[in-house]
Image: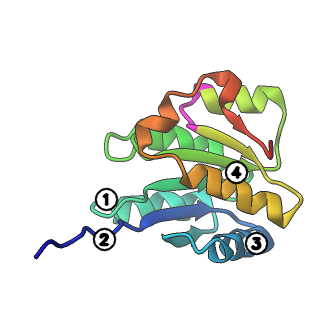
Amino acid sequence: MTHLAQPVRKKILLAEDDDDDSLLFRDALGEMDADADLNRVKDGEELMNFLNGKKDILPDLLFLDINMPRKNGFECLTEIKNNHSFKNIPVIVFSTSSGREIVRRMFDSGADLYVCKPNRFSVLKKIIQRVLSFGCPDDFRKLPFEKFVLNEK
């Protein structure tokens, strides 16, 4: 008798201080019927405490807001990419900030993808689906700067 391997559920961590944005993200993921588990932290300090406490069960994807209290996304990204235990977690910046300087800074700091928070729920679902369609962490790291920003197109 042959046993088929069960698909592995993706572990997603959302670092987002805004309750409404978090709820929309959770709802979008739920409507997509994605094979994923979502955890949320509300600020940068909580994010780093979460990662340090879960070194044996790290997330497969981290959606990181830039503008968070206590420790912002820039600080967290630097800590993550400088930590041997965390540096291979794909980090998807998920922010309302869209200035070229900010995007470039996140790219240069090691973020794997940049998503400007969309205004429409349907677009949010499409973007999350596109991110989940990446096969493995190395798929993110192959993106040049010109393809670093993921938008609704």
Residue 66 visible, this orientation: no
Residue 108 picture location, percent across and down? 60, 25
Q: Earlier in the sequence, mark 3 or mark 4?
A: 3
Q: Residue type at mark 2? A: Gln
SS for callout 3: helix
Q: Residue at x 58, y 70 (%)?
A: 40
Q: Nearer the viewer, mark 3 or mark 1?
A: 3
Labelled disc at residue 24: 3
Is residue 111 one of those drawn in magenta?
yes
Q: Earlier in the sequence, mark 3 or mark 1?
A: 3
Which range is magenta? 108-112
Label 2 belongs to which residue? 6
State the quadrant of the N terminus.
bottom left
Labelled disc at residue 94: 4
Residue 29 picture location, percent across and down? 64, 70
Label 1 belongs to which residue? 55
SS for callout 1: loop
Circles 2 and 3: CB atoms closer than 8 Å: no
Spatial CA distance of label 1 from label 2 is: 24 Å
Q: Main secondary structure of the magenta part?
A: loop
SS for callout 4: strand
Q: Earlier in the sequence, mark 4 or mark 2?
A: 2
Q: Label 3 crowding class (10 Å Cα cut-off): few <14, some 14-19, many 20+?
A: some
SS for callout 2: loop
Q: Residue at x 73, y 76 (%)?
A: 23
